[in-house]
Image (cartoon, rainbow, N blue to C red):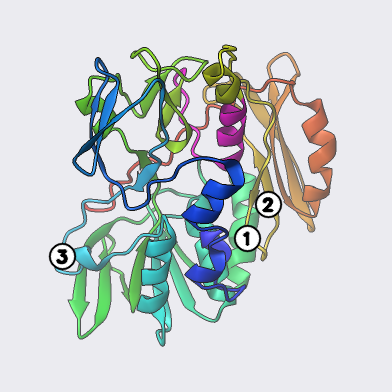
């Protein structure tokens, strides 16, 4: 909701659906707001919360993820913002009030959504990415080129295949110098290059971590009675920082905690890219899947279907008018689709 709230003129407070007290009453739980967990004692089944001991029978780590911070150079690097929660969004809205120009680092899912939203709200937006195409981890080149053109028509300027040498503050503005010598002037710089799971607390407790907190297909870590869920979890090697995988995992974890061990299965989960200038729905194939993209393009849109070498449909990317085929193609996908989409990883913007 954060990446398409400007055009809807929604403040951070307007995006807040329920406070802690309402949520606690609704689903009959205890919520401890403003609480910091500093340690997990797995052997004694205890966590340290605000300096006090809290015992548990079962523990679920749903810690989320942090924005990736690029190793940028220059005295303006520290002023680069990111948006990952309501507080971030509130600060970002305050920063761009009465401003006109915004530079976005990253032409992935979130970068493109923010760019479209901010352009629609009247801002001049320039997007910088080292990759040669936008949405490079989701779309084949033909599809990326189509949505690229539509977003450019909406007013967004892209600098692809470009790395950043420095970001400097000049009288309240930021000057981004690219490796090719070009410069981008901006009032505010927003980083949208991906997320990294929060694993430090788990690691300090001896819980196995990799990219995320490592779990099996029942979301259990290497520690008895300790589980992980959501953006922080790496389930059988998969890190899936999206809403639908999290919901599937929660539906499996609930009966497991109640005494009925249940494995998580991921059905086909098409993802809507929130770019009104060019509708886009993507259901990528698993990383490393054997097959090829088959692309059908016309002036109104592009249908790209990824087929296994045996002919089985494993994924698709629908752009423009082709999004009308979402339901039909989803039905043709395997009932349990492994969607090991890699997280957006740090991009070496600095030389």
The earlier-in-sequence mark between 3 and 1 is 3
**Residue 234: which quarter of the image?**
top left
Q: Position of residue 315 (x, y in %)?
A: 68, 31
Number of numbered discs: 3
Instruction: Give me the disc on residue 335.
Output: none
Name which of mark 1 and mark 2 comes first in the sequence: 1
Quadrant of image for the N terminus:
bottom right
Instruction: Label 2: state its secondary structure.
Output: strand
Which residue position is annotated with label 2?
280
Please give the name of the residue rendered at 54% of the width and 74% of the height, measured from the top-left corner: 119
Residue at 74%, 21% in the rendered image: 335
**In this picture, residue 108 sits left or right of residue 349:** right
Tell me the residue that label 3 is attached to: 74
List the residue tagged with mark 1: 275
Mark 3–mark 2 Cα distance, whole angstroms, equals 36 Å
How far from the left and from the top, in percent, is residue 227? 42, 22
Binning the other alpha carbons within 10 Å of mark 2 as few (below 14), some (14 to 19) or many (20 upward) gives many
Q: Toward which corner of the image does residue 83 lie, by quadrant?
A: bottom left
Let me know if residue 208 is in the magenta part. no
- State the extent of the magenta-drawn residues as a range: 236-251
Neighbour tally class for label 1: few under 14, some 14-19, many 20 plus, Cα within 10 Å: many
- Residue 154 vs residue 11, the one in the foreground: 11
Mark 1–mark 2 contact, CB under 8 Å?
Answer: yes
Q: CA distance from mark 1 to mark 2?
A: 7 Å
């Amino acid at each position: 909701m954060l990446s398409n709230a400007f055009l809807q003129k929604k403040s951070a407070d307007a995006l807040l659906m329920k406070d802690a007290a309402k949520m606690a009453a609704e689903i009959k739980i205890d919520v401890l707001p403003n609480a910091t967990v500093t340690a997990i004692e797995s052997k004694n089944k205890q966590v340290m919360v605000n300096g006090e001991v809290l015992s548990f029978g079962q523990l679920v780590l749903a810690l989320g993820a942090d924005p990736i911070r690029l190793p940028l150079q220059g005295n303006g690097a520290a002023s680069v913002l990111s948006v990952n929660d309501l507080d971030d969004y509130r600060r970002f809205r305050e920063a761009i009030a009465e401003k006109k120009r915004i530079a976005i680092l990253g032409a992935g899912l979130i970068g493109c959504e923010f760019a479209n939203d901010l352009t629609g709200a009247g801002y001049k937006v320039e997007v910088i990415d080292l990759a040669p195409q936008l949405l490079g981890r989701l779309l084949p080149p033909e599809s990326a080129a189509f949505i690229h053109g539509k977003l450019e028509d909406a007013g967004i300027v892209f600098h692809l295949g470009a790395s950043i040498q420095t970001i400097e503050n000049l009288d309240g503005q930021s000057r981004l110098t690219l490796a090719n010598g070009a410069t981008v002037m901006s009032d505010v710089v927003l980083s949208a290059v991906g997320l990294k799971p929060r694993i430090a607390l788990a690691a300090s407790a001896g819980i196995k971590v990799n990219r995320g907190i490592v779990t099996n297909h029942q979301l259990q870590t290497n520690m008895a009675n300790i589980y992980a869920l959501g953006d922080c979890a790496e389930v059988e090697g998969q890190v899936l920082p999206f809403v639908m995988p999290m919901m599937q995992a929660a539906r499996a974890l609930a009966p497991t905690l109640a005494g009925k061990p249940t494995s998580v299965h991921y059905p086909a989960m098409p993802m809507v890219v929130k770019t009104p200038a060019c509708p886009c729905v993507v259901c990528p194939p698993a990383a490393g899947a054997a097959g090829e993209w088959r692309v059908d393009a016309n002036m109104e849109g592009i249908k790209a279907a990824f087929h296994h070498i045996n002919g089985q449909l494993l994924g698709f990317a629908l752009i423009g008018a082709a999004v009308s085929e979402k339901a039909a193609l989803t039905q043709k996908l395997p009932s349990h689709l492994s969607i090991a989409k890699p997280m957006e990883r740090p991009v070496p913007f600095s030389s």
